[in-house]
Image (tube, rainbow, N blue to C red):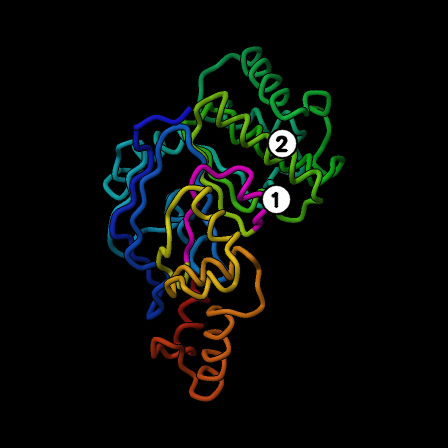
Amino acid sequence: MQSDEIRISVRDLVKTFGSQTVLTGVNLDIRAGETVVIMGGSGCGKTTLLRLLIGSHTPTSGSISLLGKDISTLDAQQSDALKRQFGILFQSGALFQSMTIGENVALPLQEHTDLAPEIIDIQVKMKLELVGLRPHANKLPSQISGGMMKRAGLARAMAMDPKILFYDEPSAGLDPVTSAEIDQLILELTRSFGVTSVVVTHEMDSAFTIADRMVMLDGGRVLKVDTREAFDRIRKLSEADAALLSEDEQIVYQFLRGAANGPITRRRSADDYREDLLGIDSQGNDLASQRASAARF
C-alpha cells in the first residue's frame, strides 16, 4: 500500500564522466510502497541513475536522499547502515557459485546481524519460501535454471527485510512465462511488505504489469514521469494523434510502441553521420576523449 512518505528524493542530479554528460537535471520523488519503472533506450542513463541511487557512483552535482538521508553527506559507517535498508537484484542474480542457494541468502544475515545460526536458518527458509525455492536450498547455482537464479537473488535481496528494493533488468534473458513469474513476485512483495521498488527495464510487457509510475529517460534527461495509465494512453494513440504530440512525447510514443520510424531513429541517423564525418557527437563533444574517459570507469 502506497503512502505519502518519500523514500527516495533526487534533486537536480548531474553525472559526468570526463567531458561526457550522462545525466542532467534529474528530479524524482519515489514514495513508500510504490513501484517505479525507469526506462529508456540504450545509453539513456538509466543504469547510471541506478548506480547513483545505490551509491556505486557519486553525483557530479545535485543530491540523492534515501530514507531521509542525503547519501553524499554520510560517513562510511552511516553509509553501511543505510545500505542495510535496501536490497538489490542484479541482472545476472550475482550469486556466489561456490555457495548453495541457502548459503547465498544467509550471507547478508551472517555479515550484518548477530542472529543465532538457528534463527538465520529460519529466516533463510522464510525468504526462500517467498520465492518458491525452499526445496532447492541445498542446490548450487549451477544446478538451477536462470529464472530460479533470479528468484534466489531476490530472496537474498530480501534477507534483511529492506525498505527499498532495486532491480536491474529483472526479466532480462528469461522466457515469457518465467518473466511473468518474476513480475508477480515483485507485485506480491510490494503489496505484502510495503517495499518501495525501483525497476530498471526495457521490457515493456513487464513495465506495464508492475509499474505504479514510470520514468522515461532520453539522452540523460527525464522526458516524462507519470502514472502507468498516462503512459498507456500515449502508447494506444493512433499515429495521426501521436503526430500532434510534443517532440518529447513523440519520443515516448515511439519507444513504447517499438516503432521503427520516429524522432529516435531520425536523430540516431543524423548523429551517426555527424560522428562518422567529424568525430564529434550532437553536443559537440570529442568522441575520442569521451571513449578514453569511459574506459576509466
Q: Residues within 10 Å of mark 2 (few under 14, many from 20)?
A: many
Going from N to C along the chain, the mark reached first, 1 or 2, is 2
| Residue 70 on image: x %, y % | 25, 39
Residues at marks 1 and 2, CA–CA distance in whole angstroms = 14 Å
Q: Residue at x 48, y 68 (%)?
A: 264
123 over 26 or under it: above or below:
above
**Region rendered in magenta:** 203-217
Tell me the quadrant of the picture where the N terminus can be found.
top left
Residue 17 painted magenta: no
From where the camera sits, is residue 248 visible? yes
Q: How many marks?
A: 2
Q: Position of residue 153 (x, y in %)?
A: 59, 34
User: In percent of the image, x 42 and y 32: which residue is there?
Assistant: 34
The residue at which mark 1 appears reads as: 171
Give the residue number, with chain letter if any, for mark 2: 152
Comparing labels 1 and 2, the label whose residue is closer to the camera: 1
- Say left or right for 148 vs 267: right
Three-letter amino acid code at the position of disc 1: Ser
User: 10 Å neighbourhood of mark 1: few (<14), some, or many (≥20)?
Assistant: many
Q: Position of residue 106 (x, y in %)?
A: 57, 24
Circles 1 and 2 in contact, beta carbons < 8 Å: no
Identified at 28% across, 53% down, the residue is 13
Residue farthest toward the bottom in the current orientation of the protein: 277
Kind of residue indicated by mark 2: Ala
Identity of the residue furthest to the right in this view: 143
